Image: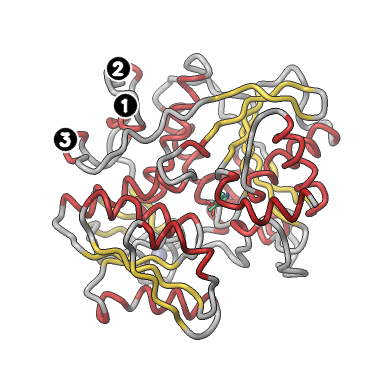
Amino acid sequence: MIYTCMNCGHEQQASPLTIQCQCGAALWVKPESRFKKSSLITGDFSMWRYSSAYSLQRDDVKVSFGEGMTPLASAEIAGISILAKMDSQMPSGSFKDRGAAMVVNYLNQLGIKNIAEDSSGNGGSAYAAYAAKANMNCYIFVPKGTSLGKTVQTRAYGAHCIEVEGDREDVALAAKQSVDTHNCSYVGHNWHPMFIEGVKSIAYETWEQCGYQAPDNFVAPAGNGSLLAGAYLGFSELLEAGEIDKMPRLFGIQTEGIQPFVQTFNHSPIKIQDIATVAEGIKIKRSSRLDEIVAFVRESNGMFISVDDQQTIQSLKNMAKQGFFIEPTSATAFAGIEKLVKLGEISAEHKTVGVVTGNGLKATSTIQTLLG
Ligand SMILES: *Cc1c(COP(=O)(O)O)cnc(C)c1O
Ligand SMILES: [Zn+2]
């Protein structure tokens, strides 16, 4: 497997210790195989059904809960019918299991026993779950003062939470340096190339669930943008393989206070206005793959837009009234669809998929406050 850099073009052999290019940019897995519908593993009802699309052999997948193939359920937003891709039903309750499953299997096959991640949220829980299944030691670096409540799921899986003094960047640095301090491989979900390789599965599943076609629109919250990147790569591979005849338009939804993707997309300087938001999972000031993902979205003829907390909360309630209990962060996708309908970008004739990135059960106390 080769890692490639979209910033400077440098290529290198993949290794468990490599996660960043010499130029500082994030790395990507260089595509090796080309998926064909005929290579679909029909007896496998998980994300590994599309193994020929991944840079990991099916036989090397030993750590699995049978993840993936999450339901695509109909819902109504702003008077039109859409489809909700329910990644809230992944093993640890968020789409991050797609990436964690891929990274952990890749490292497990190489005999790695210790992994490190910096995330007090869904990324940490996802890695902790797969590490538990793989019998690996999992070290999750979190900012000092992180409430114990936030890391309950991670700690229940047996991961070690290590508090780090300083800001988000200091925490990431400590996790990266854990190769020396804890003999770890760093698996940070915003950096590891194999994480995105796993997220590609959401495109393949959506394609099959839409009757071997791409939807017209694919809408997701955008924090680091890994979900959008995985969707883009999956759909573009399907396009290259001739399995679809057009890309879906990709839409990334951010919050008004933190919208670096929106600003970069609109050729404006990045300005962080307000980091207080109910959409905890997308409070990312600058993506490790900012320019690449803006280019992906542009190429798909999609857009980045932002929604405010009021719209997000309204959308969360609207989805709940239809039987979907979703994380506030996920609700931005559906608030975004509503806005895109009003802007005339999405209409009733389209097949539109919104991703339920996380389960509402992860945020019951926040949602309790929102319900009043
Ligand atoms: C991580 C996360 C996101 C954002 O995904 P990115 O790949 O960082 O853009 C959105 N929703 C939930 C629930 C998440 O956990
Ligand atoms: Zn580079």
Question: Residue 70: x and y, percent?
Answer: 47, 30
| Residue bearing mark 2 | 42
Identify which residue, 300 or 333, lies in the foreground. Answer: 333
Q: Is residue 71 visible?
A: yes
For image coordinates 38% across by 51% down, the residue present is: 195
SS at circle 1: helix
- Disc with the residue nearer the chain's start (3 vs 1): 1
Residue sitting at the far left: 111
Q: Is residue 243 above or below residue 146?
A: above
Measure how far apart labels 3 and 1 are at the Cα level. Answer: 12 Å
Q: Where 163 sits versus 104, above or below?
A: below
**Disc 2 to disc 3, C-alpha distance:** 15 Å
Q: Position of residue 310 (x, y in %)?
A: 82, 51
Q: Amino acid at mark 3?
A: Asp
The one of 287 and 318 positioned closer to us in this rendering: 318
Residue to which mark 3 is pinned = 59
State which image quarter holds ligand 2: bottom left
Taking the spot 45% from the left edge, 48% from the top edge, the residue there is 96
| Circle 1 crowding by C-alpha within 10 Å: few under 14, some 14–19, many from 20 | many
Name the residue carrying label 1.
49
Q: What is the three-letter code of the residue carrying label 2?
A: Thr
Q: Residues within 10 Å of mark 3 (few under 14, many from 20)?
A: few
Asked whether disc 1 touches disc 2, contact meaning CB atoms under 8 Å apart, the reply is: yes
At label 1, the amino acid type is: Arg
Q: Secondary structure at mark 2?
A: loop
Residue 246 occupies which quadrant of the picture?
A: top right
